[in-house]
Amino acid sequence: MIERAIVQSNGAAELTEEVFWSVSTRARRFRLNLLNVYPKLRQFLRSPWYPDRINYGFTLGFFAITVAVLMFAPQTRDRNAALNLFWAWWWMLILATFPFAGRAWCAVCPFMIYGELAQKISLWVNPRQLRPWPRQQAEKWGGWFLFGLFALILLWEELWNLENVAYLSGCLLLLITAGAVIFSLLFERRFWCRYLCPIGGMNGLFAKLSIIELRAQQGICSATCTTYQCYKGGPQKGEGLETEGCPLYSHPAQLQDNKDCVLCMTCLKACPHRSVELNLRPPGIELWTTHKPSYAEVSLLFLLFGAVFLHRLPEIEQQFGWSLHLSDFRIHTAISVLALLVPAAIALFSHSLIRLLNPKTRPFLELAYGYLPLVLGSSLAHYLRLGLTEAGRIIPVTIATFGADTQNMSLPIAVADPAVIAFLQGVTLIFSFWLSVFLTQKIARALDGIFPRRDVQRAGLPGGLAHLQRPQHRRGGQRLAFLQRRHPGQVVAPRHVGQSPSSR
């Protein structure tokens, strides 16, 4: 093990924890290697097309155009194609793909493409050794940094109505890109992606539920491999191609969690022994087998859950007949913070009651991951209405982006019936709720007598979510008036239940 760690560390001054790993004696059951079943998939993933030609041939330029349209085109979502793509298309699609593709979005992420480009140009202009990763500090504080950054973004989004103000959405994209560029100029590889990116943190959290995983055969890696080029990079060797090594400094044989793999397939290209596998697996299996919980991740999980309630504040106000005075900025800010805290407070209180009834109940830190399917499902249900009512208007919105008057044009649109949307939202919430029930049971391995009380703990939140997702068209006018109070003199599209765009 020590010899392997020395080779893998590539001459580093000290050996850090990630280079020490042993062959697991625990068999990984219920896996199907897709690379063996579909040889053409292996061929594509090892080709120059994935992801480099996609990134530098399409994403790099498309992202620049998107930001330019956000900054300089008309500023409302009904007249800005980039704003429509960002809020009506991207959020719905990325949430829907997490269970199937894990963190694959990060392999084609425009933020880090610009970070890598800046890093390459910087090293060409000023050749130097970039800083090694401060792993201990990053492991300790990185999760809290991205949690805090995500909380600030959510409050900014709610209080300044980012989803319907194009230049502010553009500023958000530029802010995240700036973080990627700055840390790429300071540190090796993709330090920002692994530890600090708020979108990457969300992606890594939901990737735990994915039905696919990238791993390697530990027997081959420990007994046959002597170079560890998948980890540290190196020249071509046999079938292995020349690479710069894993951008996240993860060895596929030691991966226990999907959050530290962006599916860039660098290891697949570098491996000369065909050890790397892209496995089909039971969704979320790592959460009750090899998973290591952390407080920062659980905090992010409930922050994302609170975001669903945050962006439903007008609906909550209407439903309960409250007067929340959301037109007052200070009151709106305080209530927004409270909305982000409510799900965590309810879950903690419920768990405390359960522990009083049964002291043998597992710690909240472990059981909290049972909420993961419900958080993903409620976030997706929230975006379904926006996606299914506005994404299909992309053609007239694109034409309007360039200043054309579309009122007298007969242009194709695709808008789902409200009943269909409500049905899909309900199915999504119910399905994700029972997945959470199943996952909690698997994590807790609880007795049948204990488990019904856990059901009660979770039942209140999805019930409220389902009620808020129901279409109530009378809210549209009230929401429009509210937005006009917040942005006097500006044409603002209504953000009622049928067009509520945001939550994570």
Image: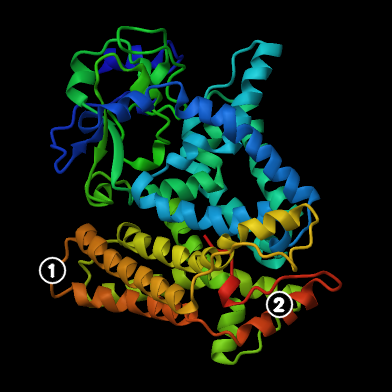
> Could you tell me the amino acid type at mark 1?
Leu
Q: In the rendered view, would you say 130 is above or below 409?
A: above
Write down the residue under mark 1: 447
Count residues near mark 1 (Cα–Cα under 10 Å), then give few for <14, some for 14-19, many for 20+.
Answer: few
Q: Is residue 352 visible?
A: no
User: Distance from label 1 to label 2 (Cα)?
Assistant: 45 Å
Q: In the rendered view, would you say 242 is above or below 101?
A: above
Q: Position of residue 37 (x, y in %)?
A: 20, 33
Q: Position of residue 282 (x, y in %)?
A: 22, 49
Residue furthest bottom in the image: 321
> Could you tell me the amino acid type at mark 2?
Ile
Write down the residue under mark 2: 331
Q: Position of residue 286 (x, y in %)?
A: 26, 47
For this rendering, which residue is in front, 136 or 257?
A: 257
The quadrant in which the N terminus is found is: top left
Q: Are marks 1 and 2 in contact (CB under 8 Å)?
A: no
Place residue 273 in its image quadrant: top left
Residue drawn at point x = 74 percent, y = 47 percent: 69
For this rendering, which residue is in front, 109 or 417?
A: 417
Q: In the rendered view, would you say 322 is above or below 327?
A: below
Q: In the rendered view, would you say 234 is above or below 275?
A: above
Q: Position of residue 383 (x, y in %)?
A: 51, 64
Residue 155 lies left or right of residue 431; in this view the side is: right
Residue drawn at point x = 31 percent, y = 30 percent: 41
Count residues near mark 2 (Cα–Cα under 10 Å), then give few for <14, some for 14-19, many for 20+.
Answer: few
Circle 1 SS class: loop
Residue drawn at point x = 35 percent, y = 52 percent: 99
Circle 2 SS class: helix
For this rendering, which residue is in front, 363 or 80?
A: 80
Residue 124 lies left or right of residue 422; in this view the side is: right
Q: Earlier along the polypeptide chain: callout 1 or callout 2?
A: 2
Residue drawn at point x = 51 percent, y = 81 percent: 471
